[in-house]
Image (cartoon, rainbow, N blue to C red):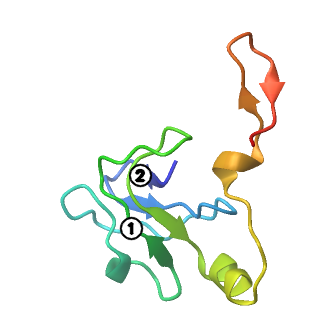
Amino acid sequence: MNTVTTAAGRVRAVCEFCGRQSRPVVPVDGRVWLLDLPRGWSEAPYSPTFTHDDGSTGSLWQCPACVRRLHRGEGLTSRAYAAPAALPGGEASPRP
């Protein structure tokens, strides 16, 4: 999940690494815009119709803390790959 919509119709970006959520912003054309987010958030832009392996769509977001960790050279695992993938029989399997 890359964004969360609040009951008021605003949208929060969700960090692809730690799951931290931004403050809610008013969506433009149903999307979060980087310049509307607090300072320090980063975006890996994707088309709104692009579907990621975890089933989420659109851009990926990184919170300020994870951006700092990445700039220090730390390797972070995306939440989409942190959990084991489910096999058709219901068994769990680690992602490649």
The furthest residue to the left: 29
Residue 94 location, quadrant: top right
Query: Which amino acid type is marked by label 2?
Result: Thr
Quarter of the figure that contains the C terminus: top right
56 versus 39 height, above or below: above
Q: Residues within 10 Å of mark 2 (few under 14, many from 20)?
A: few
Q: Secondary structure at mark 2?
A: loop
Q: Residue at x 69, y 81 (%)?
A: 70
**Viewer-proximal residue among 30 and 16:** 16
**Earlier along the polypeptide chain: callout 1 or callout 2?**
2
The picture places residue 3, in percent across and down from the top left corner, at 45, 54
Query: Which amino acid type is marked by label 1?
Result: Pro
The picture places residue 58, in percent across and down from the top left corner, at 38, 54
5 versus 95 height, above or below: below
10 versus 96 height, above or below: below
Q: Which label sits on residue 55? A: none
The furthest residue to the top: 89
Q: Which label sits on residue 6? A: 2
Q: From the viewer's perspective, tell me whether residue 85 is left or right of residue 51.
A: right
Q: Residue at x 49, y 54 (%)?
A: 2
Q: Secondary structure at mark 1?
A: loop
